[in-house]
Amino acid sequence: MNEGDDTDVFGLLGRAFLQQGIDMDSAIFHLTRAIEIEEAAPQTSAPQWRDIQRRSLSHLYSLRSEAHNSNEDFEASRRDNETARELNPR
């Protein structure tokens, strides 16, 4: 599983660990991997799909911000939250 490059799998695993609330390091690991994969993906030329990619990445950063906050790494949480807002300012 960890050898694959599936953003959805890593994102869902990260979210599951986050919701479980007892293993924030695993949540951060999986969300970081999802972010890396998503950032490495080629951007599509269609504006509506670029918006979806940007919102997806913003959501991953928001989730990781929450995990960092639970780990009391407030600076990392703040950085991820700012990145999420830059990607999706709405």
Image (spheres, rainbow, N blue to C red):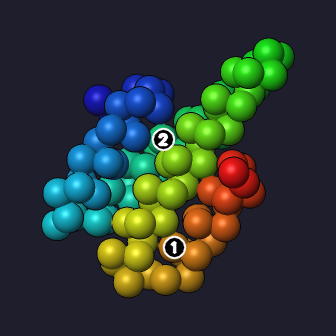
Which label was assigned to residue 34?
Answer: 2
Which label was assigned to residue 22?
Answer: none
Give the farthest residue toward the top.
46
Q: Which image quadrant for residue 68? A: bottom left
Q: State the image coordinates of residue 80 (x, y, percent, origin top left).
A: 58, 65
Query: Residue at left 45%, top 59%?
Result: 64
- Earlier sequence position, callout 1 versus callout 2: 2
**For this view, does 79 lie left or right of residue 25?**
right
Query: Residue at left 33%, top 48%?
Result: 14
Of the residues shown, which amino acid type is indicated by label 1? Ser
**For this view, does 88 lie left or right of residue 35?**
right
Q: Which image quadrant for residue 18? A: bottom left
The residue where tag 1 is placed is: 77
Q: How many marks?
A: 2
**For this view, does 82 lie left or right of residue 44?**
left
Of the residues shown, which amino acid type is indicated by label 2? Ala
- Can you say whether 51 is above or below 17 in the image? above
Query: Residue at left 41%, top 66%?
Result: 66
Label 1 Cα neighbours within 10 Å, binned few <14 / some 14-19 / many ≥20: many
Q: State the image coordinates of residue 29 (x, y, percent, origin top left).
A: 38, 55
- Can you say whether 74 is above or below 66 in the image? below
Closer to viewer: mark 1 or mark 2: 1
Label 2 Cα neighbours within 10 Å, binned few <14 / some 14-19 / many ≥20: many
- Can you say whether 89 is above or below 53 in the image? below
Asked whether residue 81 is in view, the answer is yes
- Can you say whether 24 is above or below 31 in the image? below
**For this view, does 90 lie left or right of residue 30?**
right
The Cα atoms of the two marked residues, 1 and 2, are separated by: 17 Å
Q: Secondary structure at mark 1?
A: helix
